[in-house]
Image (cartoon, rainbow, N blue to C red):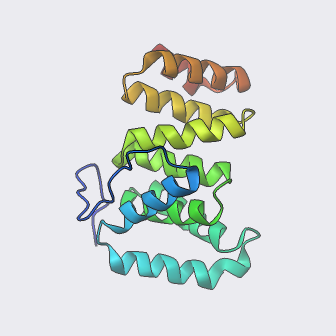
Amino acid sequence: SPRPARTSIRPIRVPPRPSTPETIPQLLARMQKVAEAFGNTTQRAAIDQRATAQAAKYKGGEAEALYAQGAVYFLKGYYREAWYAFARAAVLKPTNAVYLTNLATTLQEIGPNQEARLILEWVTKNYPNLDPPFGALGTTCIALKDYPCARSALTRAQTLSPQTGMYDYALGK
């Protein structure tokens, strides 16, 4: 059976970062194209086929079907496929905080942390009552060595969900 993709992934043709700021829909479309550049054509076709076939079973339609597949792939360590599924879901529903946060979390594992940060900054700005995006932003900022950003985001996550010990742990880091 195939081994899960880990951090040593090298896309073939990666769309470059633009020199001007991107809107969230533009960034999400670029992240989908980067995910497509991994060359896992057979897996991506299977993801798309399943999402289309299962869309009617989900309240959120095809986007939610993609998200559900992405969650399974992520939990099993197949980060390339998770990235693609979450990116497709986010492109279809670019204001869904859950889809965007999961895409950013996948980017933390194998993708560019700067893009994860941009996505999470948008989510936390537009959904200031959700602790998971603030927690993910905090850990992204730690990876980027931006400790003031990390402290601010993790403190906000901790304030929103004081019973969640992982924010205490991350602040301690």
In this orientation, which residue lies closer to the viewer: 24 or 5?
24
The quadrant holding residue 133 is top right
Q: How many marks?
A: 0
User: Image height check: is 159 above or below 120?
Assistant: above
On the image, the x and y values in percent for residue 89 come to 58, 64
Quadrant for the N terminus in the image? bottom left
In this picture, residue 67 sits left or right of residue 80: right
Quadrant for the C terminus in the image? top left
User: Image height check: is 98 above or below 39?
Assistant: above
In this orientation, which residue lies closer to the viewer: 140 or 27?
27
On the image, the x and y values in percent for residue 29 come to 49, 61
* Point 32% across, 73% down: residue: 40
On the image, the x and y values in percent for residue 118 come to 51, 40
* Point 48% across, 43% down: residue: 21
Res 82 seen here: no
* Point 68% across, 54% down: residue: 96
User: Image height check: is 165 above or below 20?
Assistant: above
Res 76 seen here: yes
User: Image height check: is 19 above or below 156?
Assistant: below
> Quick one: which residue is furthest to the front in this view?
20
* Point 58% across, 77% down: residue: 51
